[in-house]
Structures are given as structure tokens and as C-alpha cells.
Image (cartoon, grey):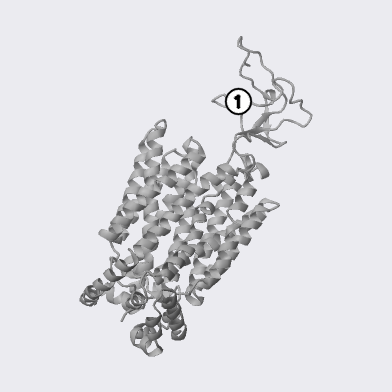
Amino acid sequence: MAFNDLLLQLGGVGRFQQIQVTLVVLPMILMASHNTLQNFTAAIPTHHCRPPADTNLSKDGELEAWLPRDGQGQPESCLRFTSPQRGPRFPNGTETNRTGATEPCTHGWIYDNSTFPSTIVTEWDLVCSHRTLRQLAQSLYMVGVLLGAMIFGYLADRLGRRKMLILNYLQTAVSGTCAAFAPNFPVYCAFRLLSGMSLAGITLNCMTLNVEWMPIHTRACVGTLTGYVYSLGQFLLAGVAYAVPHWRYLQLLVSVPFFVFFIYSWFFIESARWYSSSGRLDLTLRALQRVAWINGKREEGANLSMEVLRASLQKELTMGKGQASATMLLRCPALRHLFLCLSMLWFATSFAYYGLVMDLQGFGVSIYLIQVIFGAVDLPAKLVSFLVVNSMGRRPAQMASLLLAGICILINGVVPQDQSIVRTSLAVLGKGCLAASFNCIFLYTGELYPTMIRQTGLGMGSTLARVGGIVSPLVSMTAELYPSVPLFIYGTIPVAASAAAALLPETLGQPLPDTLRDVENRRRGKKTQQQQQQEKQMVPLQASAQEKHGL
């Protein structure tokens, strides 16, 4: 009897799975809020230099006398006249072009607070010569996500998924709340980095804990549900940011709920599959019996014993006792093949994704509207991805989503700048494909790596994704050479990376691998007939479970 058979015997998708999956997935609704929060907390309102303190701003035309105009006739954002310049006026009352010596904004800036009453940009003057500090804050957040993926992915394989979730919820709550009260910019960046670390751990352990407690036929459903909850968070962010435009209140509002998540996470049940792969048969038995009791399968739970588990999980106990290590991903040929291919997919997806979603003000429309549109496109994109994943498989879904995303971005690079509707539509379509790619790669990676190193593999994949998120803002600086250069780069990478998916094995309908031997046998095709026999035997069990639980 394999582990999947045990789950089906103890209720399949029973009351326990429904409750725990819901509670584990719920915090994901705020993941989008934190990942793209800086679109709102670091928004750049219209601004211009503040004149000297002794200037009488109530006098008509006094402020304008200090402000030179740019090529479009708008006040310069980063320069002012060294002395007021009052030129002659046209018959309609407007002034002619004024010229004179200029200087940087030595007395600060005046901001248009009509849309954004307070952001970190207006509070700490992150404009003009300090504008790069704005991107530094987001880059440090991504560095935190990168570190968290490496550290918490590894620790989850050593200490367990549940312990890491508890720690990550608390760290997110504390660091996010402290960021809302940060007295200066360096302190704010430090707490954002800590938030990024813990949020990476939440993302990884959320997917893994759920997948390891679910039967084979429901894994794609869980992955799609997680993706939809994340998409719902994008709608939530637009509404909350519109209702609470002050950056400190907004930061606090998306952080405090994690205290609630921290409290109820103590009631989670650790993955029995992780227990067994760690050689803890006593804890495996206890966890399975608790699940059987919650699912109303008390008799089946009572029939479980140490002898039954030893016979059922003999492979996990005899071959899964080795400690997981990131170096195994490079030492073992089968794992190295998976690691290199998946690294390309993770990097390309994140690189192009954040290249699009972290420049909402560049679309020339309401930042709140474009946030809603970007969230709305995820709904059909992830539905199509779910159908393809379940019918055609993970590999074609991963290839198609990356390829279509890259093509949309590349086409956008040759569309004229004045075609704003066409450009925005292509960007939204590309973003939807990248969201589908993210949805697929989390599930695909979890199914490819064996249990003993699954979290480490997910962590390393997420690490490469964060490298893409860090590099992405740097690529946007190439727009100074030519406006479309960033789009050509953002589009080329996912198109090239889509070829790596063709080198990966299909996992549709396959049992989760528990050991390195499973991965090597799958690569060599040794277990194909055995797996087909197992699937035939599981059909009536799955049908019975689906009928009973309404799936």
C-alpha cells in the first residue's frame, strides 16, 4: 500500500483536508498585497521644487516664477530658478517662456497629494537624485524573499513544514507592523527585508503542506485554488489601497492579520509524509490517526499500527532517512537535471512577471484600475491553466504559458508608443500567461522533487525566481538607450526558457516520489508498467472517494 492509498483509506478529501487546506491557503490572499505593495506605498505623485521659505506663495504667480518648464510646458520636477523669473505675458494672460540660471531643489519639494496623501516617496523625498532609493526598497524586499526561500526551504526539510509556517506567520506580522512605524528609510528597508524572508517561507510551505496531505487526483485543484486566492488578493489590494491611501495605515492593515494566522497555525497537523521520510514512524502513525478521527474514519484509524505502517511505507523508511541537502541537487544526476531545468523556468517566470507588474504608473491610466485589470486577467488565465494541467499535463501547460507570455511582450515592444490601448492589452495578456506559469510551476516542482528534498528544491527554485525579481528592475534602466529594449529582454527570456520544460518528465496522474530512487527510476522509465497497474487499481478507490465527498 502506497501513501496515497493510506490517504484514500482514511477519507481522501475529508473534513480534515478541507479545513486545513482552507486555513493554510487563506494567508495567501495577502501575499499579493505584500509583493506589489510598493506600487501604492511608494507611488510617485506629481512634484516640483519648493521655493525659498520667505516666498509669499499666496501672491499670484509667485510660485510659478520659481519653476522652469520642460518640453511639454509642465514645471520641472528637479530644478528651480536661482531667483524668480517673471517674463512678459501673452494677450490671454499666460507667461512667455522664461529663461534663467537653475539649481537643484535645495528646499525640498511640493507634492500633489490629491491621489496619494502620503507615501514613502513624499515622506522621505525619494525623488530626483534620491529616486534610486525607491527601487532599492523593493530590491531589498526581493533579497529578503531570496534569502527566505533558501533558508526556510532548507529548514522545512529538516524541522518540518508546520514549524516553519508558525515562525513565518509571526515574523511577517512583527516585521510588517514595525515597517509601518519605521522612523526612517533604512529601518523601513530592514523590516521589509525581514518581511520578504518570511513571506517566501509561507509561500513554499503552504503549497507543500497541502500537496502532501492531498490524494493524487486533487493536487491540481489545490494548486489552482492557491493561485485563485492569490489573484483575489490583487483585487483586495486595489480596494484597500484606494480606501486607505496613507502608506503607514496601508502597511499596517496588510500585516496585522498575520497575528491571527500565527495563532491558528498552532492547530495544523504536520505532514505525515514528511514524518515518514524523516524516519519518525511513531509521529506518522499519530498524525494519520488524528486525521482518521477528524474525517470520521475512526475504525480505519484504529486498525493502523506500527506493523501496518512499516509494511506500507517500507520504501520511505528504508530509503528516506538521509538528510536533505542543497548540494544533493547538484551531486545526483537525476536531481541535477531537474534543478537546472526548473531553475530556468522559475527565473524566466519571475523576471518577466515583475518586469510588468512593478511599473503600474507607466501605463498612463489609474493605478487602481490597472491593478484590478491585472487581477481580473488571472481568473480566466488560471482556469485555462487548470484545464490544460488536468487534461494535457503539467509540461505542455508550463511550455505554453511561458511561450505565449514571451510572444505578447515581444509584440508589445514593436507596437508604437501612442497605441496605449493595444500596449496595455498585450501587457495584461502577457501578465495573465505569467500568472498561469507561476500557478503551474509551484505544482510541477512539488511533484518532480522527492519528499526528502522537496522543500529544498522548492526553496532553490523560489530563490532563482527572486534573482529574476531583483534583476528585473535593473533591466528597466535600459529604456534610456531605447524605450522598447526592456520589453525585448523581458520577452526573449521566457520564450527561450519554455524549451527547458520539454526536457522535464510529465507528472500528471503519477504518485509523488519519496526517494532519490523514485526519481532515478522515473527518469529511466523503469516503473511505467507498475505505475499503470497502480492507477488501474486506484480508479475505483478514487471514484468512491469523489462520490462520497462530492468532488
Farthest right residue? 54
Q: Position of residue 115 (x, y in %)?
A: 59, 36
- Residue 249 placement (x, y as % from top left): 63, 49
Considering only vertical position in the picture, is 298 above or below 212? below
Secondary structure type for disc 1? loop
Q: Which residue lies most toward the top here?
A: 91
Closest to the observer, 542 or 103: 542
Residue position marked by numbered label 1 in the rendering: 69
Q: Quadrant of the N terminus?
A: bottom left
Q: Up-down: is 219 above or below 333?
A: above
Q: Is residue 253 above or below residue 359?
A: below
Q: Kindly indicate the quadrant of the structure image that contains residue 306.
A: bottom left
Is residue 519 visible in the rendered image? The answer is yes
Give the percent coordinates (x, y) of residue 546: 31, 67
Identify the image quadrant of the C terminus: bottom left
Judged left or right of residue 277, residue 169 is: right
Report the amino acid beneath label 1: Arg
Query: Considering depth in this image, is 133 or 19 the residue closer to the camera?
Result: 19
Q: Is residue 478 visible?
A: no
Name the residue: 30% across, 53% down. 400
Q: Is residue 204 left or right of residue 50?
A: left
Q: Is residue 276 above or below residue 217?
A: below
**Image position, residue 504 (x, y; %):** 30, 65
- Indicate left or right for 394 with 347 as reference: left
